């Protein structure tokens, strides 16, 4: 393998830069040239790339987002788009590709693998819904961002005797909501994986209020409902003031935590090793603190990452 390419795709996540740095450094050590495609599959189809030497990846470890930029590119889902990408890779004499992204991006990686191109995937998405990895890149940083925000909101909630609905990201996954509710000491986590009865929650809130506990934090996964709708229902039912905070894209940015920097470095190194060893069509992931490889085919056809343990913990803790 003489030349490899990297791209970051889908929603950006903190640690992508640290991972690109690790890939480049590992590859250069093995005498392999590296190029980075801009804006995910878009750059791959357009042949928009930059050479990545050691200098190109210095000073990026602590930066959130992705300096290669990311995009959603529907055109890559089509056979024409995929042909453009393969033609471009051939023209540039790229021998293998490492793709960082969420389940959509990894499905794209599997497509290229099935078309015969050597590919390795790295799970990078704050949603933590990708199976065969305990954590995807950026999840820990997003959780820390959320916890910081919830701690701040708790101060003002208690000062004004208000209930707050805090809407967090995660698409159809409730992982961010469950874990941030556990770690922030929130009263409730409303997640798509678990049914809940809003009128019962309102009743409990009213009882808490009557007992003198006059504020509450309800963490809502975006996949359940709009924060404002839930807050309106609570206000109508219990009478006391409610406010809504939608944390939005704030959750995705910021300097990666130590956990994400280390995970990024470990996954990047493993991805290059897999590619060079000819162990293609795999995803590098984290399992019981060990970096492991799983066929992309299993990752994509596997169910969503199981959230059972965290859901059970929330339940036991009365969240
Ligand atoms: P994420 O990777 O964060 O889940 P998306 O689901 O938006 O984000 O996917 C990112 C990109 O991956 C898409 O814009 C598209 O280019 C590519 N992709 C997604 N699904 C497929 C698919 N089924 N086949 C080929 N490419 C796909
Ligand atoms: O998949 C990552 C994610 O941040 C989701 O949690 C969220 O629903 C979505 O991406 C937001 O996408 P966009 O950045 O395109 O608004």
Image (cartoon, rainbow, N blue to C red):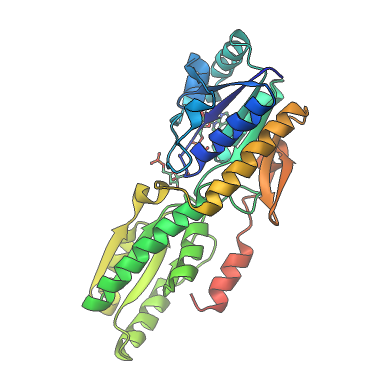
Q: Quadrant of the N terminus?
A: top right
Residue 75, visible in the rendered structure: no
Residue 249, visible in the rendered structure: yes
Nearer the observer, 306 or 180: 180
Q: Residue at x 46, y 24 (%)?
A: 38
Q: Residue at x 70, y 26 (%)?
A: 30
Q: Residue at x 37, y 62 (%)?
A: 148
Left or right of 134? Residue 223 is left
Q: Position of residue 154 (x, y in %)?
A: 32, 71
Residue 294 quadrant = top right
Q: Residue at x 23, y 77 (%)?
A: 159
1 lies above or below 119:
above
Nearer the observer, 314 or 255: 255
Nearer the observer, 108 or 24: 24
275 lies above or below 212:
above
Q: Position of residue 134 (x, y in %)?
A: 64, 54
Left or right of 254? Residue 176 is right
70 lies above or below 141:
above
Left or right of 154? Residue 255 is right
| Numbered label tally | 0
Q: Position of residue 121 (x, y in %)?
A: 63, 35
Q: Position of residue 254 (x, y in %)?
A: 39, 47
Q: Residue furthest top?
A: 91
């Amino acid at each position: 393998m003489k030349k490899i390419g990297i791209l970051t795709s889908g929603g950006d996540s903190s640690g992508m830069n640290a991972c690109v740095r690790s890939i480049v450094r590992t590859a250069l050590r093995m005498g392999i040239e590296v190029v980075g495609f801009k804006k995910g599959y878009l750059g791959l189809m357009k042949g928009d790339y930059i050479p990545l030497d050691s200098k190109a990846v210095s000073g990026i470890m602590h930066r959130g987002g992705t300096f290669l930029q990311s995009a959603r590119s529907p055109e890559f889902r089509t056979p024409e788009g995929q042909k453009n990408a393969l033609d471009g890779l051939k023209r540039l004499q790229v021998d293998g590709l490492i793709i960082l992204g969420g389940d959509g991006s990894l499905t794209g990686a599997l497509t290229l693998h099935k078309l015969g191109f050597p590919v390795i995937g790295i799970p990078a998405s704050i949603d933590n819904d990708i199976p065969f990895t305990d954590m995807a890149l950026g999840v820990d940083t997003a959780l820390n961002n959320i916890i910081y925000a919830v701690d701040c909101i708790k101060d003002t909630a208690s000062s004004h005797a208000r209930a707050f609905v805090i809407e967090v990201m995660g698409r159809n996954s409730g992982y961010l909501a469950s874990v941030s509710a556990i770690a922030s000491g929130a009263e409730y986590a409303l997640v798509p994986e678990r049914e809940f009865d809003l009128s019962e929650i309102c009743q409990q809130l009213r009882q808490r209020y009557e007992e003198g506990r006059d504020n509450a934090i309800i963490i809502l996964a975006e996949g359940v409902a709009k924060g404002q709708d839930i807050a309106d229902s609570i206000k109508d039912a219990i009478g006391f003031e409610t406010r809504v905070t939608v944390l939005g894209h704030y959750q995705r940015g910021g300097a990666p935590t130590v956990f994400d920097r280390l995970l990024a470095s470990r996954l990047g190194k493993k991805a290059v090793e897999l590619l060079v060893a000819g162990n293609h069509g795999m995803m590098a992931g984290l399992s019981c603190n060990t970096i492991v490889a799983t066929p992309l085919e299993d990752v994509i056809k596997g169910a969503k990452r199981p959230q059972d343990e965290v859901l059970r913990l929330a339940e036991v803790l009365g969240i």
